Image (cartoon, rainbow, N blue to C red):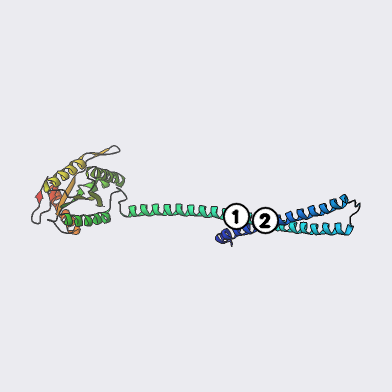
Amino acid sequence: MTSDRNPTAAAVAAPVAVELALEKSQDVKAKVEACADDLASANDIVKKKIAEGATTLSAHTALANSERVESKVHECADDLHEVNETLTQGIDDLKQIETDLIKSRNALADTEAALATAQEEEKKARLRALHDYTTGLPNRDLFDDRLAHAISLAERHHWTLAVMFLDLDRFKNINDTHGHAVGDSVLKEVAKRLLQHSRDEDTVCRNGGDEFLYLLMNPQGSENIERLADGVLKNIAQPIDVGDLHLVIKPSIGIAVYPDNGPTGEQLIRNADTAMYRAKNSMSGCVFFNARNGKEVA
């Protein structure tokens, strides 16, 4: 239900009405003082007549004076009643304005709270849209965006980049033997270990299934890339405990380096994928992309 009252108009009108009432109150005060003067004058006349030895006063004169003063008193009473009504209405209006302001403040607070909740939900939605549900890692869309940005920086600053494509060997056997819940636990642990091994400027994402992508920012040479890849291999190869199960996962890693192995993110990922299959087929652990025959690193 909505009110027809206009808080803004009421806020302006109420003080004006009170101000006018106060002005009228001053007029009433002046009239009352005049009545008092008239009564004093009438009394002085009576006292003077008595002092002069008069024992009676004209009834007509006394009555006329009394009626005149009475009329003024009634007029003052009416004016005071009007002033009181105006002041009462003004006070009621001010109370209503205060009530309306409190409601407005509460409505504003509710709106701000709703906005904050909506913004938080939007933030969570964006986070969910750009991250893998199972592992919490960035998904392929976010990885592609960061890779494109990294290539722009590398081109500007003459850096190198490396994309590592990881695939978990025989992961399907874990799902088939122990179920998808165990498989998801393994994926979460692999993601955790990849993050522990990564640097702040790097990005690790789940590409889907048992595949992961790892972006190395400015790795500063193939030897450093090899060292980082070897650390990833050893870290993931440590046994993973899921309940009473002790599982060992070994990844195959393919590596493509910017700009030598491609000027775009799409080419780098494709070439890293090619190198990963060479690593898997040769059981060598990690392979740098080579357009002709590949180069084993580990």
User: Left or right of 81: which side holds 67?
Assistant: right
For badge 1, the amino acid type reads: Leu
Q: Is residue 208 visible?
A: no
User: Left or right of 103: which side holds 129?
Assistant: left
For badge 2, the amino acid type reads: Gln
Residue underneath mark 2? 26
Counting residues from the start of the chain, the first of labels 2 and 1 encountered is 2
Residue underneath mark 1? 94
Residue 211: x and y, percent? 23, 51
Frontmost residue, 174 versus 77: 77
Judged by depth in the image, the label closer to the viewer, 2 or 1, is: 2
Say what secondary structure mark 1 lies in: helix
Q: Quadrant of the C terminus?
A: top left
Q: CA distance from mark 2 to mark 1?
A: 22 Å
Residue drawn at x 78%, y 55% as measured from the top left: 38
Neighbour tally class for label 2: few under 14, some 14-19, many 20 plus, Cα within 10 Å: few
Residue extending farthest right: 55
Say what secondary structure mark 2 lies in: helix
Residue extending farthest top: 244
